[in-house]
Amino acid sequence: MKTCYINSAVSISTQDTFDVEKLVFKPLDYSNSTVKAKYLEFKKFISPIALRRMSSAVKMGVTASQLALSKAEIEVPDAILTGTGMGCIDATETFLEAIIANNEDYLTPTAFIQSTHNTVGAQIALGLKCKSYNNTYVNGAVSFESALLDAKLCIELDEDNSILVGGIDEIGATFSDLQYKNELKDDSEIRLPKSEGAHFFGLSNIKKENSICLKSVEVLHHLKINSIETHAISILKKCGLDEVDAIITGHKNDEFDVYYESLLENTFQNTTQIAYKDVVGDYFTVSGFAVFLAQYMLINQTIPEGLTVKQNKAKPFKTILLYNQEQGQNHSFILISTC
Amino acid sequence: MSLQLELKEKIIELLNLEDIAVEDIDNSDALFGDGLGLDSIDALELIVMLDKDYGIKLTNPNDGKAIFQSIDVLANYIKTHRTK
């Protein structure tokens, strides 16, 4: 079985994360229930003719993918695998609103074409003229992880040599607000804003200068709260490890944070613990940011400023475990390490 | 507002031509090909716009080639055929 290397990691998020040498995070704006990503000058990356039809998810995804391929020295990948929770929700909203406004008549093609969940993966393939395996996972909070798992298996089983993997989500004009109102119920305090972003990675079976190893990806729909620690330990054991140097968790400042606490209170209580959603907000594929962050930490051997860190042991980072869940379901564990 | 100006504003907004202003479009400029560079998806958007805003139903999309030659040609066609 071949080793799966992550040879590049690119992030577009609410912070300055795109193609920067040093990551420094600023506090997220909690005055609104939604926070947009920091949009780039997309004209530098995408032709104006293509750009005018693209929603922000497509713009972010296509741009991030270009840099991920370039950094990984991949011209045309053997597969393009994307994950998205809501797909191109903005175009979907536009299309659905047009249906209502025009009494199911006068339906225009652009929003319909752009509204499908696989638009980002398709646009990347079109731009590269790549006719290889192309799949988009739409599995809620484990959409990105599902794409990553597929890529890992393809590399390990020698089906593909190089794969582009990404997670993308955008904020729609209406849906995110409705989603937030539903979650808040009677509590009017904004615990964590909804946000958006795109994270792309160049994976390969060839080790390069700044490669890190993707050791394990596990996705579980159900996991009892008292089984989380045991499960995490079993993942480490399968990879020949007794401990990790850091754990990155998806704390959201809500009642489901107890799942993270159950992982961190015993075996891993003295492990460096990092939470990240308080600086980038929340969306279905935000775990892509966690992988980007872990890759940065392993390569630069430092934790970026502005993150919530507990038990910082200030020792070299060789292995990092990522754990995320959404409302007590859709648990994901990702283990990465230096090579 | 002249119909030509109205059409230019609608086309810019409808087709999301972010970098183009009304002044950039000459009434005789080709809308497709070497002119504004519109394509077949834009043609479908324009066909829907004709139906929705002017009550003109193009049953044969190929008719669009002649009708969408330029702003002047389009405006003349609308003046002759509009039902609203």
Image: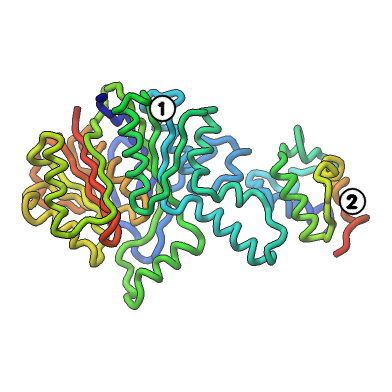
| x 31%, y 33%: residue | A153
Residue A18 shows up from this direction: no
The label on residue A278 is none
**How was this image coloured?**
rainbow
**Which residue type does callout 2 highlight?**
Tyr
Quadrant in which the N terminus of chain B is drawn: bottom right
Residue A307: percent from the left, percent from the top?
22, 51
| x 9%, y 56%: residue | A265
The label on residue A70 is 1
Residue A141 is left or right of residue A237, and the answer is right
The label on residue B77 is 2
Q: Secondary structure at mark 2?
A: helix
| x 14%, y 37%: residue | A238
**Which residue type does callout 1 highlight?**
Ser
Please, is residue A326 above or below residue A180 in the view?
above
**Residue sitting nearer the eye, A105 or B50:** A105
Residue A206 is left or right of residue A176, and the answer is left
Q: Secondary structure at mark 1?
A: helix
Callout 1 crowding tier (Cα within 10 Å): few <14, some 14–19, many ≥20: few
**Residue sitting nearer the eye, B49 or A217:** A217
